[in-house]
Image (cartoon, coloured by chain):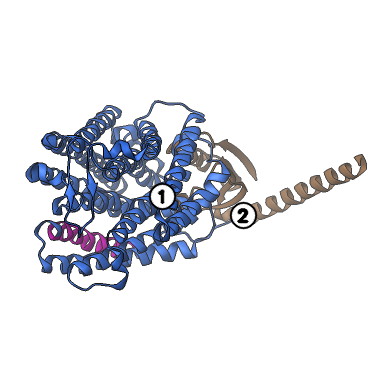
Chain colours: A brown, B blue
Amino acid sequence: MILTQIDVSELAPPEPMTAILSTLAQLITTKLATKQCLLVKHRRQPFPLYEKLIATGWAYHCQVITDDEILLYIFRQTAQQDFDLYLENLESLTSLTNSEMSRQFDTDE
Amino acid sequence: MSSANFSFNALPPIDLPFRFFITAPLFLIACAFLVLFSGEALWLTRWHPSMLALTHGFTLGFITMVMMGALLQLLPVIGGVGIAKPRVIASFSHFSYSLGVISLLLAFIYGQTWLTVLAMVLLVCGLVPYIVAIAWVLIKKLSQGDSIVGFRLAIVSLVVLFTLGLLLLSTKLGYTVIIFSYGKHVTDIHALWGLAGWAGLLIIAVSFQVLPMFHVAPSFPKVISRYLSGVIFILLFVFVFAAELAMPLLVLSYGVFSLSLFYVINKRKRKISDTSIRYWQLAALSLLVINFLYFLPVDYYQAGGYQDKGYQGAEHQYSVANPSKTILLTALFIYFYLMSVIQGMLLKILPFLSYTHLQQRCLVDFSAMQYIPHMHEFLLKKHATWLYYCHLLCGFSLLLVLFQPTYYYIFGLLLLVEFSWLLFLMVRCMRLYFSAQTKINLSSVS
């Protein structure tokens, strides 16, 4: 996947939605549009956007980090398999990093 | 926690909340005429028929009407789930509820039995489907945020106050229920669950979401967002059995909320001057003033001589020198706290909803963005500022008339101006929305 990141967590409505829509509009016109994935850092889940995304051929995946921080991945529905693979790699990388950190922590102790 | 591709209900069509919003100022325009034509007599006691009509015009006609419309939109935005069959339920509820409130106000003024019965039937038809639909969402809600708990408690308060209201109306019709041997205390419970419960708790729950979201402010301190609504709700119960213990604690709880409001507002990342924020600050300041006045020695209030003996009581000593403490604090709470917050939120959500609904159509065709006006054009900043100053003037004239009822016409006229202006702002915003929508429709056809 080709990842594009935007941070809308310090923007007031409707700026987050404008930023997301304009970035998606750019991504859809690029070559390899089906490989593009937009990663949005936001303070809350943009629920009203979800159904519209699905209706227009986009898929999404939301990770709730804390009460005030979420990560939203948006990609073409046709790229679902690529995204699942990407997420699997990302998660194994994260768990590896965590286990390395805990080993390091044990060693320090 | 992760969520992926759940099936969420879309935002309900914008005309549904709009019809609740646009009806609300009409009730206060009617109330302005009621003030103008009732004269000084209206201000003699809280039990005066026109005063009962006036307070219910404010609380049911404006405050509850706006909240019903706002909840339709807020639940999908905040929680991701809206009510089922929104068009059928919202249309039916709005129609029945509006007619129910009109009948109730007329029933208070003219005292006709058939009007009271009609009001009861229409209010049941208007509120019950709405409450059931909202309760269904709140029970099934996917995530369990602090605001959702506040919404639940607010809806329970609405059920309690509505039930008590119906029982009070039945008493008026001659069907006395045993609990009404308590007399005035039941009316106080009804009023308190309405003001500090339904309206107050809903505003607190909404503020936890709206202030951080619209004003890029930090979240409320956890101890406030997690426990305050519950504490207030418990105190409302305690009030039923031990009013003298619960009331000061309730006032203090709202004082704590006002301090947390100031804290969150002052910690905003983008300190942009904004009328909506001024409304929130005015509301928070009002809660502090209410705290100060509530804890003033009672002798201060009795010096002027107004003693409220209750609905059935014949004794109504009255002096223009001092209004009763209850009336003064209630007026401050309704006009300077509840109405301020509601107007401040309307100034944010009217342009936001208009813009968001249009913007979402641009996912299909991004070029349609060119037809959407800038969000500030839906509600001009200077127009919002004028509304704020009008609200301040009108609020001060209300205080003046409480101390000196001969000035009732000033309050009546300012009320007329303020809510005619709010109505104009709403109509302007909605016209702009529908004209932009027409342009987008035409562009997509061509």
Subunit that carries the residue with mark 1: B
Taking B204 as reference, is B171 above or below it?
Answer: below
Q: Residue furthest left?
A: B37
Crowd around label 1: few <14 · some 14–19 · many ≥20 (10 Å): some
Q: Position of residue B364 (x, y in %)?
A: 41, 48
Separation of residues labelled 1 and 2 (CA atoms)? 43 Å
Numbered disc 2: what chain?
B
Q: In which quarter of the image is residue B117?
A: bottom left
Q: Position of residue B376 (x, y in %)?
A: 33, 32
Left or right, residue B381 beside residue A58: left
Residue B308 in the image: state x and y as whole percent. Answer: 24, 49
> What mark, if any, has residue A99 been given in the picture?
none
Q: Name the residue under label 1.
A: B247
Q: As drawn, is B248 to the left or to the right of B354?
A: right
Q: Against A60, is B341 above or below?
A: above
Quadrant placement of the N terminus of chain B? bottom right
Give the SS element for disc 1. Answer: helix
Task: Classify mark 2: helix, strand or loop.
Answer: strand
Q: Is residue B434 visible?
A: yes
**Residue A3 vs residue B293, the one in the foreground:** B293
The kind of residue tagged 1 is: Met
Q: Name the image quarter holding residue B92.
A: bottom left
Q: What stretch is highlighted in magenta?
A: B86-107
Q: Crowding at label 2, few (<14), some or many (≥20) Cα neighbours within 10 Å?
A: few
- Residue drawn at (35%, 65%) of the image: B85
Q: Name the residue under label 2.
A: B2
- Relative horizontal placement of residue B173, taking residue A108 as reference (left or right): left
- Residue at 65% x, 53% y is A82
Q: Position of residue B368 (x, y in %)?
A: 35, 41
